[in-house]
Image: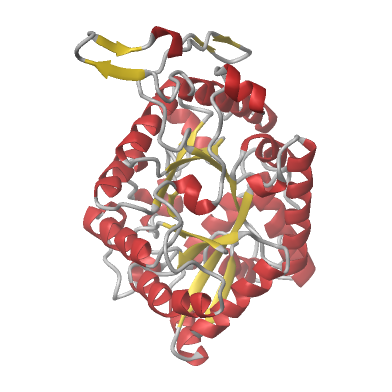
Amino acid sequence: MMKLGLFLAGTGHHIASWRDPGVASDANANLGQYIEVTQTAERALFDFVFNADSNSTFGPDDPEMWKRTAVAMRIEPLTLLGALSAMTSHIGLISTATTTYLDPFHVARMFATLDQMSQGRVGWNVVTSSAASEAFNFSRDKHAAHDDRYRRAAEFIEVAQGLWDTWEDDAFVMDKAQGLFFHPAKLHMLHHKGEHFSVRGPLMVPRSPQGQPVIVQAGQSDAGRELAARTAEVLFTVQQQLAPAKAFYGDLKARVARCGRSPDSLKIMPGVVTVVGLTRDEAQEKFDRLQALIHPELGVAALSDIVGLDLTPFPLDGPLPDVPLSNTQQGRQKMVVEMARSENLTIRQLYKRVATARGHRVALGTAADIADALEEWYRGGAADGFNIMPQVFPAGVNEFCDLVIPELQRRGLFRTKYEGRTLRENVGLPRPKNRFVASDIAAE
């Protein structure tokens, strides 16, 4: 079955969504709305909700850059997921945590705790931080180099997963009569010493009901693909066209196999911005209305951030200039530059394409049109599912759940009930073995 995630966004995924009259301008910090849309997604049987995050908003000296967008309002995501876990029972809960500026013990403990609280429904979106300005909030004077960040990330994941195996599944006996809380032989110290980290352990959280939280990534550069092939279980990707999406899909599945893993152990889920109408004209009108609300200053700022070059000195109706390789989001930069060159787009045309939702594909039309667009990529070998990104919240979420989900179910493409209670069960991922248990090691 097709896998579906709902990419949470307070006001919506269109960069001007907060200006829509039907959108609450403070939605990025509105817990009530987050609960509402997550419960709606659960009723529609989504696999998970996905929450992105960054630890900065502005560059070091340029708050003007984002003054026309709601991006300055962003609440801490793990606290949010804790609240959502108490208000739901089946839907998965995925959040971002950076490996560049956080510590593996803290991250492992926080996600293990959320996995206990949710009874095995949590995933960790591993990022190396695309916002260079995060460095200034963590006592650094510059962003670490791209390849260095990925080497640190690989070791970071290794440490976190080792800590998640601190306890065997049956370690805690809690025998009141014998006064024995746990079996010492079923506790395993990590004793990790590597290039970046030295972590003894143990973690103080029992092993997850699903074994470990699901590892999610979004890297598209060569370094990002290699890390995903070794460690990721869900990959969120930016793809615009079917042929490149199929090539990306085939490349990742082949890399996974070369790493000794089953290709099905990685679910590839491109982001898709959805605009649903009862007619195509209605959907187009909704889209055009928001496009008209993109202020040129904001459009140029958003595009500059993605390509890694300040575009304000260049004419809006001229071509995109040559841009140096970015030290932040190299995969997305490459996709946007290729789009500009292949379609001969001006800066103004390009920012209108990119600012819609950071370069993701747009599916616009009736419920049948949206279902057609998803089915073509799913059956065509370009995706295992999709991260759905409605342009406005909550209306766009309601429209997708009320109109598109029944159409996908009618076609036999999407579930009519949850397969289980954990995120792994529903996404179709195996429960990982404990690396310290002899029987598990022998079975691998």
Residue 340, percent from left and from top: 72, 65
Q: Is residue 249 left or right of residue 371?
A: right
Q: Is residue 292 visible?
A: no
Where is residue 393 shown, x and y percent of the image?
A: 35, 67
Above-or-below relation of 112 to 124 = above
Q: Please tell me which residue is depicted at 35% across the width and 39% down the height of the picture.
A: 78
Q: Quadrant of the N terminus?
A: bottom right
Instruction: Report the residue that reaches farthest toward the left.
Output: 177
Which percent across, then down, holds residue 284? 50, 85
Q: Report the front residue among 308 and 81.
A: 81
The foreground one among 277 and 359 is 277
* Residue 69 in view here: yes
**Left or right: 361, with 203 as reference point:** right
Tell me what residue is drawn at x 32 percent, y 65 percent: 40
Q: Is residue 436 above or below residue 185?
A: below
Report the front residue among 219 and 179. Answer: 179
Q: Residue furthest front?
A: 177
Q: Residue at x 43, y 39 (%)?
A: 56
Figure quadrant of the C terminus: top right
